[in-house]
Amino acid sequence: MTLEWVHPGLVLILGAWALPFLKGSTKRIAMVLLPASALLLCLRLEAGTYGAVHFMGQELVFGRVDRLSLVFSYVFALLTLVGMIYALHVDDDAQHMVALTYGGAALGATFAGDFLSLFVFSELMAVAAVLLVWLRRTPAAVSAGFRYLLLHMFGGLCLLGGVVLYWSQTGSLAFGDMSAYAGSAAFNLILMAFLLNAAVPPLGAWLPDAYPEATATGAVFLTAFTTKSAVYALIRGFAGTEMLIWWGAAMAVYGVVYAVLENDARRLLAYHIISQVGYMVCGVGIGTELALNGATAHAFSHILYKALLFMGAGAVLQMTGLRKLSDMGGLYKTMPLTLALYMVGAFAISAAPLFSGFVSKSMVVSSAAETDRAGIFLVLTLASSGTFLHTGLKLPYYMFFGKDRGLRAQEPPVNMLVAMGLAAAACILIGVFPALLYSQLPYLVDYAPYTTRHVFDTLGLLGFTALGFFMLLSHLDPEPSVSLDTDWFYRRGLSAALPVVNRGLARLEGFVGQIYDVVMQRYVLRVAARLRHLDARVIDAAAVGIGGLTQTVSWGLRAMVTGNAQYYGLIMAAGVLAALALAVFLQ
Amino acid sequence: MTTYPILTFTTFLPLVGAAAILLLNQRLARWIALATTVGTLAHSVPLYLNFDKTSSALQFVEAVPWIPSWNVTYGMGVDGISLPFIFLSALLSVLCVAVSWTAIQMRVREFYAALLVSETAMIGLFACTNFFLFYLFWELMIVPMFLLIGVWGSAHRTYAAVKFLMFTLAGSVLMLVGLIALLYASGTLDFQALAHTTPRLSLLVQAWLFVAFLAAFAVKVPMFPVHTWLPDAHTEAPTAGSVILAGILLKMGAYGFLRISLPILPDAVQLFFKPMLVLSAAAIVYGAYVTLAQTDIKRLIAYSSISHMGFVTLGIFTLNRSGVEGAILQMVNHGIITGALFLCVGMIYERTHTREIADYGGLFKVAPIYSTFLALFCLAASGFPGLNSFVGEFLIISGSFRAWPWLGAMGVWGVALGTTYILWLFYRVVLGDVRPGLRGLRLDLDVREVATLVPLVLLALVIGFYPESVLGFLRASVTQLLGVVSGPGEIAGRL
Amino acid sequence: MVPVGACLGLSAVLFGIGLIGFLSRRNIILMLVSVEIMLNAVNVSLAGFSRQLQDQRGQVLALFVIAVAAAEAAVGLGLVLALSRNRPGVNVEDLTQLKW
Amino acid sequence: MEPVAVFSITPLLAILVSAVGALLIAGTGERRANLREFWSVAAGVLQVACVASMIPDVQAGRAPQFVLFRILPGIEFAFRVDGFGLLFALGASVLWIATSFYSIGYMRSLGEHAQTRYFTCFALALSATMGVAFSANLFTLFLFYEGLTLATYPLVAHKETGEAKAGARKYIIYLLGAAKLLLVPAIILIYNVAGTLDFRSGGILPASALAAQPTLLYVVFALFLFGFAKNAVMPMHSWLPAAMVAPTPVSALLHAVAVVKTGVFSTVRVFLFVFGVEAIRHLGADKLALVVASVTILGASLLALGQDNLKARLAFSTISQLSYIVLGAALLTPSGILGGIAHITNHAVSKITLFLCAGSIYASAHKTDVSQTSGLARQMPWTMAAFAIASLSLVGIPPASGFVSKWYLAIGTLQRGNPWLLGVLLTSSLLNAAYLGPVVYKAYFEEAAESGHSEVREIPWMVIPLFVTALASLVLGIYPNPVLTLAGKVVP
Amino acid sequence: MPILAGQIAFYYLAAASVASAILAVTRRNPAHSMLWVLALFMHVAGIFLLVGAEFLAGVQVIVYAGAILVFYLFVLMLLDLPREAAGPPFGAHWPLCAAAGLIFAALLWYAREPGLVLTADGSAAGGPPRGSLLAVGTALFTLFALPFEIASLILLAAIVGTVVVAKRKTES
């Protein structure tokens, strides 16, 4: 760790441990100061490689700084700052520490130059995210967090497996473009790990399952880091993989469809993250400079406006404690400011002109058009219309307008409003001055978003969607339904499979455990008893029997002694007779 | 050699002692017996010290012509194989006198006289160098043992004594016939001459002689089918009787194989060694199984002796160096351990007057010193490495693997069962909760009893860690013995 | 003029008869008498041989046989007298006290 | 690089130190408890000193050697210290000190009976473990291996309840039975074939024997693998859960460090120093070991999932972790073996922390089951922190020591080119997370079921040692070089 | 011709003695058996004469028939046995004894060496035995002096024995 270069991520991670020892206002200042200083550090960084370390015979690079990683580090640091401001009012030290660590880990992953440190930081991110979910301390949160952990462990292990395979084949751990190894086991494993992190269906079901369970402030951080760092990794390693295009497109549609069905506010937004990330994945898949620029830009802007939307929904949750759209409504009277800031986010996400979405999403869409993938172009535009429908219209309408259920919630605390304001300002700034963002993008940008035709097309699209929305308003009432998703598999399936396996194994275990008893008790002892019986009855009896035999013979002989002299005479005669006959005949 | 006839003196000193006891009154009997046995032991020590380990020839030889017409001389001499046993007999006799110090109350003089006569017979048998004397001491041994069991035994002593007599006599009668046939066939009865100088007998004669001697030795060892007298004899014999019986009497049979069958009838041994191996393996496993099922402690240890002696015969008939050396070592070990076990059981029987395992339990809490001794001897009996019978079993099983691998497996199975029944006995008797019956009695050992057990403990440890002390003597004689009997199969050609 | 074989034949027959008498008669005295017959048979054969071998030692032996027969008869009958005193009738089947 | 033998008595001293300690402890008896405790700690410290004094020798390539008796030609009662043995001994003796402190607290707080017997047997068990670590040949190893079984029997049967007795009985029957039935013939056959029992780094089997009797040697290999029942390989494992009936410090030191590690240590010792890598590859016996180890790893982890009792769960986790080491050795690749050996220390450090935490939970909060641990973190912050760190290491998450050995094991599987084994390793780490995770997150994130629980106070005597070992497992993860250099000495 | 007369006499004597022996053995009344035994003794004496053993014949008649037989008769009278009333004269096992006796006789008859049977003229070759009475007397008192004395001793013992055995025990 060369001293002159301080890794911004490390600042956040180590700084977090200082928080519990600070009191009251000094703690608040520190909470803001830490991310701010990290942002400043990132801004001051120039391209180059720093912090190379020799660990277990491997060459680890902690600080590989280039245009791509810089962009992502800016947005991550910025979001950490905004998130911390948003969470100033929360007095649970643990949440802050975890949030900072989470941010630090994301920065770490961005700057990671080799697979090993990337793996280390991504694992750290996974653990931090789980803790964020768990810190909500509701049983639902805890089980959701556990499922999140399991899946990310699986992801982590695939990454580790892939890294090890890659390392054993190439001998180096450098994290660079992998296209040369397309198709190899290592390539697939690493790709799968990042896809899981990027919440690509069917592996992405953890996102809508875990994010709504997090605390109001925690969710803001969750939206940003894990998915976008995965996108960053995909951009760096897997640009131009054909397959990603189709995955991206599918994600876009999948996210929108489920969002429309969804009733829980933050789960709707969570589904929508998947659809937006779909755009980025699709961009990476296309792989042209424009597409990659688009993906990066979209990631940048998406982090900001998605955080803004979550802050809005979080504020409402904070003040009203409600999650379901079906029991919200009529809040515009008491929370006008939140509504306004929320609408900025809504317009940004639906890529309305003068907002950041317009600037970044269109790059990806047009890159699809350039590489004449008509189908993809069509799908992406449809998805963006869907986005405007549910985030832009359905959610605000039912949350703020809709039936007035007499909820008289006040405005959220000041720091939340300030944070939302900052995010909204950023979105507008990028929307109005795209150059700000374009200059930071990894490749030269010669794309002009504000062409009249493009503006008109977008406005037309938005208008039609609005029209459609108001027309079908009655059908779109959110019912308290639970949408089935692939996470059913490991939520129900696994928990069902586990006891069956356990019962079977426990029985086997019991059997093995008892073997020694069975063998010892039944067989050995029974054989021993039978042999003892044999020994006593047969062999001993045989020996005693011989004794008995001699006894009976002697008794028999005794009977011959009748005392009658003539018998003796007869016997003697017989004896002599025999001898005589023998002598005579044997002559 | 030394002009002073040390062997004759060692052999017949106990006889003199016995006569002295019978003449003097009862109170002095114990002390004279102790003095005589200790004297004999002292006498056998110089034997041990200046014995020349390198030569396999007989040492301390004494020869006096006795019956010229039968070419029989009164010959005494000792070589590597018989020396350990002489020392063991002397030692065990001392311990027997010590252990029956308070145990024997009635007819004390006759008891000690019988004990001393048996000692003479034992030492004489191992020290003699011709068949005639061997037979004479063999027969002499039966008489005192019969008396010991018959007079001072417990409940069914007469049955056991008569059974012992019948079995042993049946065997030795056949030996007598063999002896005479041998004399007739080869003209002399001297072991060395028979083994080396006289021309080898024809296979048929050798076979018949082998069978005749087998009968006598098999009953004594005891081998599998003819073993049923041993448990009865052991259960009924007094402690001293069991110690002598297990310690030395069983070894006379095996010693017979080594001294007579192997060197003099080598071709017959080649013919019969496979069935003998099977019999020994059967004895090991069968003995072990039946031991498992016993409920009476002494009977259990008796059956365990059958299994252990099965090992000895297994070792002898592997006919390769490590097997035979292991067998002889195991004979010494078995003498020590089983002798010690019987001493322990005798001591506890003296206090509780019951031999049923069910009546015992939790001895550790009531009699800690006794339990530690018993623990040590049980470990030794189960072949714990570092104690003496591990080395013996190691050599025997290694030899049997070389001769016939399946035998090795049976041997190992025997060892495993051996560990089970000994530790199970120990578990039931010593661990567990204290039986009500045992609570009142003053169970722990007094100084005399500890003194009797300590020498055996020392021997077990010394042989365990330094078996060279016994093996050193055997090496030369065993090589010479095996030279006569060419070993059957040397798979790995090791050693 | 008397062939020895004939004497032997006669002696054999007489001895057989004596034997039958001795083994089967129930009266002790008659058993003793049968013994006398057997002894006579022996004397006949001795005489025959002495004649055939021209050697008088046969006859001397015969004499001794007679002497011994006399002694035996005397003692036997003495015993019979003693026996008959404490038991009526001298029947050999009753005298079985000596059985072990 | 065969280390040059140098005469030195320290290995014997290391063994005698704790044996004498045991005598002193037994001598002082119940009356002067503090003095007795002092003796056991002093013995521990001395033992570590002895063992540590040999580190420079071993590192410089010298192997301290000491021959006591010559039993038979080719069999001696002798000691020889090499990197492998030293590493194991160091781990065991250091952790003994920690456990001694811990058990003082544990015994005092629960007021257990027969504490003298407890500490004496502990010291004896350690001297036996040292014996196994430093034995120069199979005979000495077998002797101390059996001695260890006997020394630990009273510890397992400490509570003297019916259940404790049954567990102890099963414990002794499995270990003694397997030793007698499988080990003795194996040792004898090896003696027959090789003529000697000494350990030599390339293995002692003559080439002629390898060619002549491959099947016999394969059988002997299997006999050794299953004979060392203490390595809890699948069919021979069920004594370990049964031995959980022992008080926690016993299961901590013995079933995490001394007893089970002796089993695995001996197995690896036999693989590398009696058979040797080439011989095993020639016999094809490594496949058997790999299959058995994999089955054990997966089976035991799955079983651990089903156990609600915390100690039972840790027991099954030990069984699966042990087979990592066997797997490592059986891979026959340099880094695989290195990983296996390193895992001995890493697993020891982390597993002992887990067991100590379980003990402290039981002692302070009288909770034994995983389902009862909800909300414990608030009441017992230090214990749960240690538990978390140790489980991180066990699962193999980077900063902790478990990751280092798992990393080398993974590379080992790849050097052998067998992806399936990599699969086994990864799935089992997943399973580790599955059965250790709930304990941690229940303690931290679930509210304690019955609020207003009586004041649960962590006992300092117990918490300090377990936190030290937890930190140790972290430090070994971050700075694994000493462990790796010692282990490296042995890798062929 | 004298040979023929001798043979006829021998055949008569043989037949007569066999018949009297059978009758002596089978008579129910002991007295009758005694008389048949007397007849047997007389015929045997005749055979002795034929064979040339005159002294023997004389002793036979005097000692055997005269003394021993008479002695038997005395005892018979003394015991005053009732006629063999009770039960059959022969023991239950008499067929066995008969068989034994007959086999015995047959064996001896078979065994008599044909060679020994001299042809009629053979006996003549030897001529009359040398003064058989003289020869026997000298032999008795020279060669067999010792056995002669022993014989007298036996007789003495018999006399004393009989007296002791048969004397009625007086309450002394």
Image (cartoon, rainbow, N blue to C red):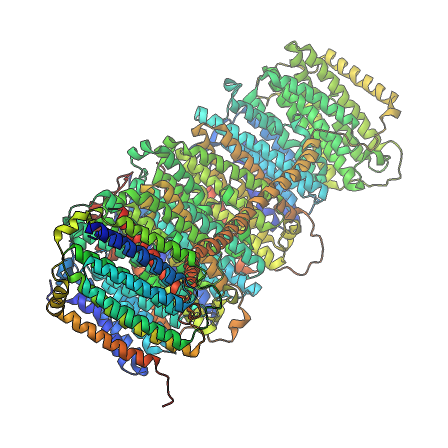
- The picture quadrant where one finds residue B135 is bottom left
Of residues B82 and C86, the one nearer the viewer is C86
In the rendered image of this protein, does residue E4 appear above or below residue C58?
above
Up/down of A66 relative to A28, above or below = above
**Is residue B34 toward the left or the right of residue A189 in the image?**
left
User: Taking the image as drawn, is residue A117 in sight?
Assistant: yes
Outermost bottom residue: E172
Q: Position of residue C58 (x, y in %)?
A: 18, 61
Task: Look at 31% across and 35% down and name the residue there.
Answer: D209
Task: Return the residue found at the far top.
Answer: A372
Q: Position of residue B444 (x, y in %)?
A: 43, 73
Q: Position of residue A346 (x, y in %)?
A: 76, 27
Residue A478 as seen in the image, left or right of residue B255: right
Quadrant of the snapshot with the C terminus of chain E? bottom left
Q: Residue at x 58, y 24 (%)?
A: A234
Residue B425, above or below D278: below
The answer to whether one can see residue D149 in this image is no
Q: Position of residue B57 (x, y in %)?
A: 15, 54
Query: How many numbered marks, from 0 up?
Result: 0
From the viewer's side, name the closer residue of D402 and C24: C24
Extreme-front residue of the structure: E1
Q: In this orientation, which residue lies closer to the viewer: D110 or D299? A: D299
The front one of D4 and D264 is D264
Lateral position of residue C20 relative to residue A361, left or right? left
Residue shown at 64% from the left, 52% from the top: D376
